[in-house]
Image (cartoon, rainbow, N blue to C red):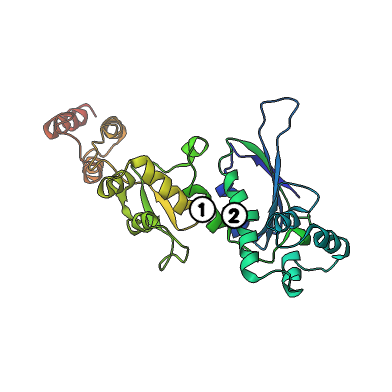
Amino acid sequence: MAISGYLSEFSLPEIFQLLEQGNKTGRLSIQEQSDCPSYKGKIFRIWFSQGCIVAAADRVDRQGLMSLIQKRGWISKQAVNRITEVYTVNKPAGLYLKEQGLLEAEQLKLLFSQQVLQQVCKLFELQDGHFQFDHQMPLPKAEMTGLTASPREVTLAGLRVLQNWDTLHNKLPEGASGLASVLTGKPKLHLSQLEWQVWEFANGSVPIQDIAKQLQLPTKKIQQVAFRLMVTGLVEEVPLLTEKNPVLTEEVPLLTETLLQSTDFEMPMLKVEEKVTMPQTLVSQSFLQNLVGFLKGKA
């Protein structure tokens, strides 16, 4: 069963978080939104294996990886064509080329960075688009280097360089909210210095706007950092009380109604006053006592 929706409703970081936590395997397709009726928008595809990103491509011929190798001049066009014709091994193409002595481990890392990390990070800039995840789609061995990436690491990288946060504005935590760590120890992700600083405030008692003041940065900047920590499963937003000892003015009418309807006037009055402290300016003690005496005289 495919899962689909729009990025305006469910952001890419949230989708990545869902797929990683669910250890999903399949293909995530993202089609950019187009204002031109004759152009449906470019489609980008990301493959997951047990929650990890293993490949990405913006073409359907499954020649993306070989094209990158050829452009870097590591393998000639003729060799690429021969490999494409005979390659039927049920393993990632990158590992196959490494076993044949045609590529080194460092070259595979560069290919994976260009093919997956750089291209996927650009998707965070999409203002809107349609996504669909299909768990029945097989993994494209010809597009795979054999390396994998945690969606959380990719999310951090993409959001760090994001310039336009308009589409994620409603996803940011409130400035008056606090942050609480959901970990028992320190994060194992590679955090930036600012991300570490914000995480150290994640004790559930310091408002984000106060964190911004202490770090001498705009509140919006800290909200963005907090969002990165939230979608990577490191912290959660917690509401903080801003008012102490609020006046319970709405409780007074209920108190008077209870007294009028009761047959035992003194005990309900004492029980209620133990629970509710009423402002002296609204109903005085002497007034209540006179009211009780009056009602007893009428009984």
Q: Nearer the viewer, residue 36 or 72?
A: 72
Q: Which residue is at the far right?
A: 85
Residue nearest the observer in this picture, 221 or 298: 221
Residue 110 on image: x %, y %: 61, 61
Q: Position of residue 33 (x, y in %)?
A: 66, 33
Q: Which kind of residue does numbered mark 1 sit on?
A: Ala
On the rendered structure, is 108 left or right of 157? right
Farthest residue in the left direction?
286
- Give me the residue at 42% from left, 45% from top: 224
Q: CA distance from mark 1 to mark 2?
A: 8 Å
Mark 2 — residue?
Answer: 117
- Residue 39 vs residue 135, the one in the foreground: 39
Where is residue 7 shown, x and y percent of the image?
60, 39
- The residue lying at 22 percent from left, 26 percent from top is 298
The amino acid at mark 2 is Leu
Q: Secondary structure at mark 1?
A: helix
Classify residue 175 as left or right of residue 66: left
Residue 213 versus residue 181 in the image, above or below: above
Work out whether residue 130 can be spotted.
yes
Q: Quadrant of the C terminus?
A: top left
Dividing the picture into quadrants, the one containing residue 278 is top left
Cβ atoms under marks 1 and 2 closer than 8 Å = yes
Looking at the picture, how far across and down is residue 263, in whole percent?
28, 37
**Left or right side of 77 for 152:** left
152 sits to left or right of 78: left
Give the residue pinned by disc 1.
157
Snapshot quadrant of residue 131: top right
